[in-house]
Image (spheres, rainbow, N blue to C red):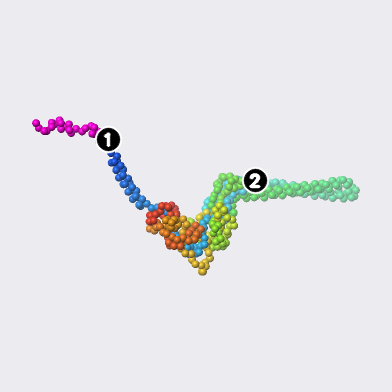
Amino acid sequence: MSDNKPDHDLLHELRIDRAQRDDDESRPRWPWFVAAVIVVLIIVGGGAAFALRGHAATVETTTAVAAASSSDAAVLQATGYVVARREATVAAQIIGTLTQVLVEEGESVKKGQVLARIDDTQYIAQLSSAKAQYAAAQAGVVKARATLQQDRDNAARMNKMVTAGYVSKQDAEQANTQVAVDQAAQDAVVKQAAAAAANITLAEVNVGYTVIGAPFAGVVTVKDAEVGQIVSPYTVGGGGIATIVDMNSLEVDVDVNETYISRVKPDMPVQAVLDAYPDWKIPAHVIAIIPSADKSKATVKVRIALDQKDPRIIPQMGVRVSFLEKKDANRKPLPGVLVPKSAIVQRDGKDVVFVVKDGRAERTAVTTGADFSDLKQVTQGLNASAEVVTTPPADLKDGEKVQVKTAGGQ
């Protein structure tokens, strides 16, 4: 008998057992899933690392200034604003409706130039009425004077006739009494005429108030009213029409820390630099030190006159000023450079600044010196004209790529 199995036995052996198949299907496949996730994360992480490698941190920078040449011996620096010593809000002095507004913001005006007009119909009518009342009062004065003169003549005759015995003493006394009454009546109408004349003056003034003029030459900085608007000196804001600034009266107000106010003297030379024009140095000098301190800020206000007038200088501009000492040939120059205090940070227990070179921030150890308001003297480790990060972020690294933020944004 042959060892070969029948064909139906061979087919039976090739059949897959259902229990074995179910066991294979129930076996967990999560190791393969985890491996796939790890591969994806590695790919994503690598792409992110590649993207971050080209990312540049945005920073603001400033230029280190040589202390020896900084404003020729600046003893103190401070910040403030341009202000106008002569500024006026031109307002209505009577109640009325605006019929004309003849100026716009930014327009230059001369002294006395008409800015606006108020409807004068009512005030002209009041003037005409006052003139009529004055004329009536004057007529009353003429009548009172005539009556007084007539009664005086009559009393004089009566007094003579009493002496001659032609009239009684009582009649003469009555005539004299009438003269006194006439005199009082005349005084009353004269005063009434004076009051009527004053009413004419008042009415003329009110008519004059309907034309609103510029009190001085300057520039219109604010326009507060339009045609058809009712203005009044009793409303909030005083019925303002426009605000005029005398540009020749511009000066600088700065708040100096009271710790350093002893360094500031009247007529002391000053150098001013506008935030809007950082390369423009404007000569100036101290006008006065206001004898009052701000206890909340521990500062003293100092007024500074600008020796150079220019249309670029406008009110409320930010400005940095340097108070200067007079040149002294025997005085040694101040060593090192000046940078903002915020530019100096601590790293590993040392004072450092971050210098921007070729688009990267280089950490540089420095030795610091004296304080000059919000500036700090660096005696070693930094050269003049170096571009330093104004306020280094805490996570800024040595050699990290940076992008300098400009004045208008990034």
The mark found on residue 42 in the picture is none
Q: Residue 401's x, y, as percent?
A: 38, 54
Task: Please state which of residues 258 and 369 is positioned toward the viewer in this rendering.
Answer: 369
For the residue marked with disc 1, what is the amino acid?
A: Ser
User: Are dots 2 and 1 in contact, CB under 8 Å?
Assistant: no
Give 300 or 278, whichever is nearer the viewer: 300
Q: Which residue is under mark 1?
A: 26
Q: Nearer the viewer, residue 82 or 373?
A: 373
What's the amino acid at mark 2?
A: Ala
Q: Which tag is nearer the camera, tag 2 or tag 1?
A: 1
- Viewport quadrant of the N terminus: top left
Category of crowding for the residue at label 2, using alpha-carbon neighbours closer than 10 angstroms: few (below 14), some (14–19), many (at least 20): few
What residue sits right under mark 2 in the picture? 125
Helix, strand or loop at label 2? It is helix
Image side of residue 355 versus residue 136, left or right: left
Q: Residue at x 52, y 55 (%)?
A: 81
Residue 21 counted in the magenta span: yes
Residue 71 at what x, y percent from top left?
49, 63
Quarter of the image where one finds residue 83: bottom right
Decide which of tag 2 and tag 1 comes sooner along the chain: 1
The stretch in magenta equals 1-26
- Is label 1 in a helix, a strand or a loop? helix
Residue 313 image point, x, y percent: 51, 57
Residue 365 at x, y percent in the picture? 42, 59
Please name the residue shown 39% across and 57% down the image.
Answer: 362
